[in-house]
Image: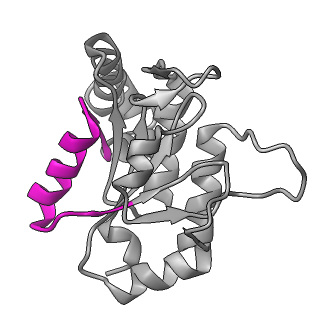
Amino acid sequence: MSAAAQVSIALIHYPVYDKNRDVVATAVTNLDIHDIARAARTFGLARYYIVTPVEEQRRLVEKIRQHWLEGWGSTYNPKRKAALELLQTENSLDEAVADVERRTGKRPKLVVTGAAGRANSVSFSGMKDLLEAEPDQPFLILLGTGWGLIEEVFNKSDYVLEPISGGVDYKHLSVRSAASIMLDRLFGR
């Protein structure tokens, strides 16, 4: 079993900051639904969670998911169906953690991400080593939306993954681009 098989990824829409550092719930986007699911499938992850307390947003995600799993989309694009089979919506991060624990029998180690560097960040190569050293341990990688995950999420995580750096001061990748880069660095060959 590859290290990725015990890893899930969660796109967190709440609690995150807006540009004024107010705690908000952000809107789900169609591109994030599809593109992160495709990246998760490409690298062999166990699950892709979209976390939002907004019921209308969860219904939208589920409607899109069902279109590709059971609707016309399932026969039109079987590769998209395979990617969206990994997708699951949850009301909160705690619910996503509980689901991983139900599926694996173990509480996942939380790996938080963000664009700002932190003194306690683990490098991609260091994280890859940790994943390979504990092949039966589930991990949940947390991606923030808006202007990033709130401080409390960082505080309750087991690891902080180093930020992606392009070598210039600008650090504002789309979350779907960041997810693909991270997954390639952790699981790419």
Report the quarter where the C terminus lies. bottom right
Indicate how the structure is coloured in the image. Answer: one colour
Picture quadrant of residue 68: top left
98 in the magenta segment: yes
Task: Please give the name of the residue rendered at 51% of the width and 22% of the height, measured from the top-left corner.
Answer: 29
**Residue farthest to the top?**
56
Rendered location of residue 165, percent (x, y): 77, 58
Total numbered circles? 0
Quadrant location of residue 87? Answer: top left
Frontmost residue, 172 versus 74: 172
Q: State the residue lying farthest toward the bottom.
A: 133
Q: What residue is at 28 percent from the left and 41 percent from the top?
A: 93
User: In this picture, is 126 found above or below 54?
Assistant: below
Residue 10 in sight here: no
- Residue 184 visible? The answer is yes
| Residue at point 35%, 23% (across, down) | 61
Q: Which residues are magenta?
A: 86-110
- Who's the residue at 57% across and 28% down the image? 146
Tell me where residue 126 sits by quadrant.
bottom right
Q: Position of residue 52 (x, y in %)?
A: 33, 26
Measuring from the top left, give residue 101's x and y in whole percent: 14, 59
Quadrant assignment for the N terminus: bottom left
Left or right: 84 as drawn, with respect to 160:
left
In the displayed structure, 96 sits above or below 41; it is above
Does residue 150 appear left or right of residue 173 in this picture?
left
